[in-house]
């Protein structure tokens, strides 16, 4: 889930609903995420940290930045980079809406949960 908020500093809210006194939540979006094989297995084990992560719109795509997904324990040399940028999957209209809001009003896209 992505929340559009007017707070610019990252807060530690992973796994909790956003606190109303820290953020003014304007809108909620659900998106998919593009993961590799070992990332999927780590996410299923619950090894995801959204503490310092945020999303940005680049070239008509939404990217999740600084989301830490721990390496899969049984993975081999093909394990993923824990802090790589991951593409979020949204409809074109939603991406255009997010791009407009973040550029015009200096809002922040905050991921809140992996579901």
Image (cartoon, grey):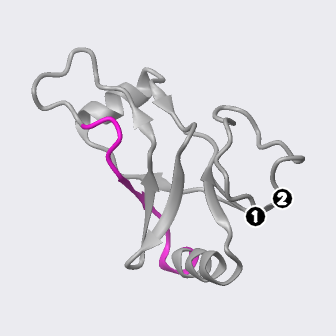
Q: Secondary structure at mark 1?
A: loop
Residue 42 image position (x, y, % from top left): 36, 26
Left or right of residue 95: residue 21? right
State the mark number for residue 77.
none
Up-down: is 27 above or below 58? above
Q: Look at mark 1 in the image and give the residue it sits on.
A: 6
- Foreground: 74 or 10? 10
Asked if residue 72 shows in the view, the reply is yes
Q: Residue at x 66, y 32 (%)?
A: 15
For the record, the magenta segment spans: 81-94
Q: Look at mark 2 in the image and give the residue it sits on.
A: 24
Quadrant position of the C terminus in the picture = top right
Q: Residue at x 64, y 63 (%)?
A: 108
Q: Residue at x 35, y 41 (%)?
A: 83
Q: CA distance from mark 2 to mark 1?
A: 6 Å
Q: On the image, which quarter does residue 64 sit in? A: bottom left
Residue farthest toward the right in the current orientation of the protein: 21
Magenta span contains residue 45:
no
Mark 1 burial class by Cα count in 10 Å: few <14, some 14-19, many 20+: some
Asked if residue 115 shows in the view, the reply is no
């Amino acid at each position: 889930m992505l929340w559009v908020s007017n707070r610019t500093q990252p807060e530690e809210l992973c796994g909790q609903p956003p606190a109303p006194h820290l953020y003014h939540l304007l809108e909620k979006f659900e998106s998919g995420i593009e993961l590799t094989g070992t990332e999927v297995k780590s996410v299923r084990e619950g090894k995801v940290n959204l503490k310092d992560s945020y999303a940005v719109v680049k070239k008509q795509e939404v990217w999740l930045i600084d989301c830490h997904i721990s390496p899969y324990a049984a993975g081999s040399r093909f394990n993923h980079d824990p802090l790589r940028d991951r593409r979020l999957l949204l409809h074109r209209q939603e991406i255009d809406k997010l791009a407009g809001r973040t550029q015009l009003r200096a809002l922040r896209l905050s991921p809140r949960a992996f579901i």
